[in-house]
Amino acid sequence: MVPGIGGSDDEHWQSHWERELGPAADRIEPASWDAPDQTNWLATIAKKSSAQSILVAHSLGCLAVTSWLTRATSPAALGAFLVAPPDRAGMTFPAAASSFSTALARMPVPTLVIASSNDPYGTRSTSKDLSIIWGASFIVAGPLGHINSASDLGQWGQGRSLLEAFTAGFKTR
């Protein structure tokens, strides 16, 4: 699990999924959730990931995962499930995350981008454009805001179904 800035609180779907999946879900542990540093986040992804991992990222975590995947020199994961990638050039992008960049290359693993039709941090159009650049499949999940705790999704069953469909056939640990 690769949350966004601030981490994922107890009511975030990533936290629900971690509790449900137990040891099969492992969250990165960067030096700071609130003052994120891309170099540090990439290093923490490298520590937690393996060639058998499915990277499940939200928001700023999507930028970290895609940056890491494009720099990895060996098979780094089985796939990337990216939810609500933010628009790095958008007016609402947090200043605290200024060290983060947007990868502008095709992902070396199967990738799925899930967007909301009313995300204040990344428009549907921007998310679609990123999915094209990344060579990813693209799904609009509906008007879910930033697909975070404020969206009041709880366990977000729709997202779990999408993850299960995405990973069908992957050989994981």
Image: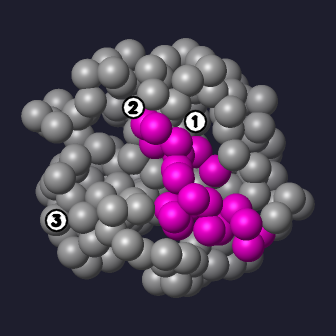
**Residue 84 occupies which quadrant of the picture?**
bottom left
Q: Residues within 10 Å of mark 1 (few under 14, many from 20)?
A: many
> Residue at (52%, 83%) from the top-left corner?
157
The residue labelled by disc 2 is 103
Q: Amino acid at mark 2?
A: Ala
Label disc, if present, on residue 69 of the rendered structure: 1
CA separation in Å, label 1 and label 2:
9 Å
Circles 1 and 2: CB atoms closer than 8 Å: yes
Circles 2 and 3: CB atoms closer than 8 Å: no
CA separation in Å, label 1 and label 3:
27 Å
Q: Is residue 76 above or below residue 57?
A: above
The residue labelled by disc 3 is 118
Q: Residues within 10 Å of mark 3 (few under 14, many from 20)?
A: some
Q: Is residue 7 magenta?
A: yes
**Residue 127 occupies which quadrant of the picture?**
bottom left
Question: Along the horizontal axis of the image, is 122 left or right of 42?
Answer: left
User: Number of numbered discs present?
Assistant: 3
Q: Is residue 111 magenta?
A: no
Relative depth, front residue between 121 and 8: 8
Magenta part of the chain:
1-21
Relative depth, front residue between 9 and 17: 9
- Residue sticking out furthest to the left: 91
Q: Amino acid at mark 1?
A: Leu
> Residue at (49%, 75%) from the top-left corner?
154
